[in-house]
Image (cartoon, helix red, strand yellow):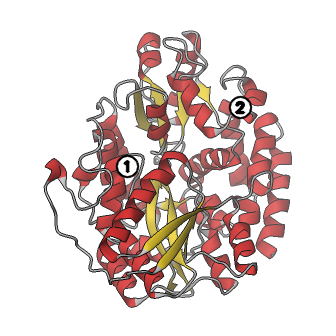
Amino acid sequence: MRTRITHDRSRTATRTMRAAAAFAAAGALTLSLTACGGDDGDEGSGDKGDGGKETAATVTLPKLNGETIEVAAVWTGTEQENFKKVLAEFEKRTGAKVTFVPAQDPIINFLGSKIAGGAPPDVAMLPQPGAIKQAVDKGWAKPLGAEASKELGENYSQGWQDIGKVGGKQYGVYYKAANKSLVWYNAKVFENAGAAEPKSWDELLSTAQTVYDSGVTPFSVGGADGWTLTDWFENVYLSQAGPEKYDQLAKHEIKWTDPSVKQALTTLAQVWGKKDFVAGGADGALQTEFPASVTQTFTGGDQPKAGMVYEGDFVQVTVGEAGAKVGTDAKVFPFPKVGDTAPVVSGGDAAVVLKDSKGAQALATFLASPDAATIQAKLGGYLSPNKAVDNSAYPNDVQRKTAQALVAAGDDFRFDMSDQAPQAFGGTPGKGEWKALQDFLKNPKDVAGAQAKLEAEAAAAYKD
């Protein structure tokens, strides 16, 4: 799950502390929860509530009989199939025909080729929200219409509305969100080791040593996907340097050679650079993609390849695919605080209209409604920033608590830093921040060298 965004709102440390408390409290409640089964209703329709009872639609949509709409997104596998069920409900209500167009990363390049060929999709789900501004600057994106904006205003906090704006105009509907400040662990490994859930970075290192002493490598790191490494860095940096520095670095108002970056990288090296703390070592981690990093933590019986894996709430989808049960086999704790407060980092996927048609605007309106989000919430592996979604729609207690915390945080969160960067720096495989942090994972002793690479890449990308 990759998300990119540009915004320049400054929030106070106090607000971030409140958000951290909200997520931490929710996280504490999830530690011993068991999953509560599967879907809470009909898989293919959004008009079924708990217990299969019919519920009235909350949003009015126009009749679009015969109109065709294309939606492009980088989603694959289960994520794509679940979203298609949302689109099927839109078809049912409007009479339109909606086609899902699989896109490739970086999506801006994919859209550029489509537009150059005269065949842009009607709507694009941008998982790299810095691309929203790029799409606006290139003249591709169209402002949301009155109905979509009205739905957004009724169902979203101001913060989630603002990050979809460019130049004061609303372009993005944040249909999907993520809590990216979670560490998942193999419950059996912790039980066998006598390990406790840590609340601070020092406690995390102590817990990791306890797991290692029990004969299991502490961490699984999906280093083949550079975005996972940016998420590691952002949680450490936000907690350690604080929200003001975080905002400044996100906008490149301070350089990556700043002492605060040195401190964060040095802290990360306490995990990445410690012999035998990372499954497969640095070389193995750099060959491990995100799904495999999760799978190898929750397969292998009492001797998995690792005891813990860091990433967002969406980990639970892969946990299930690995045959493990969320809340029983796989448990979770909030990313431990490195500084004064625990970090709260969020991400998201925004729907952006590329063709200003009745159908495209209607789809954006639907995606801004609780009707659409409720369908996908029931299917699992999904969080919505839509505050009108009933929490009971989520299929297990872990996800319900995580969703509740996301909505409770309101405007008090920090959006994924790499998501705020130009795509060339924060969202392109083998380039920019992704590549620089992969190089740092391989050689975590070279903090100064990593800073120099990060700054050189950032300076070029932000200049462009």
Q: In this view, does 399 lie above or below 364?
A: above
The amino acid on which the numbered mark 2 sits, given as a three-letter code, is Ala
Q: What residue does disc 2 label? A: 285
Please indicate, yes or no, whether residue 162 appears anywhere in the rendered image.
yes
Residue at point 30% right, 72% down? 93
Q: Quadrant of residue 104?
A: bottom right
Please indicate, yes or no, whether residue 405 appears anywhere in the rendered image.
no
Residue 450 is left or right of residue 42, and the answer is: right
Q: Which mark is residue 23?
A: 1
Q: Find the residue positioned furthest to the front.
A: 66
Residue at point 74% right, 33% down? 287
Residue at point 38% right, 90% down? 146
Report the number of numbered marks.
2
**x, y (%) of residue 37?**
27, 35
Residue at point 79% right, 68% down? 461
Q: Quadrant of residue 419?
A: bottom right
Q: Is residue 93 above or below residue 424?
A: below
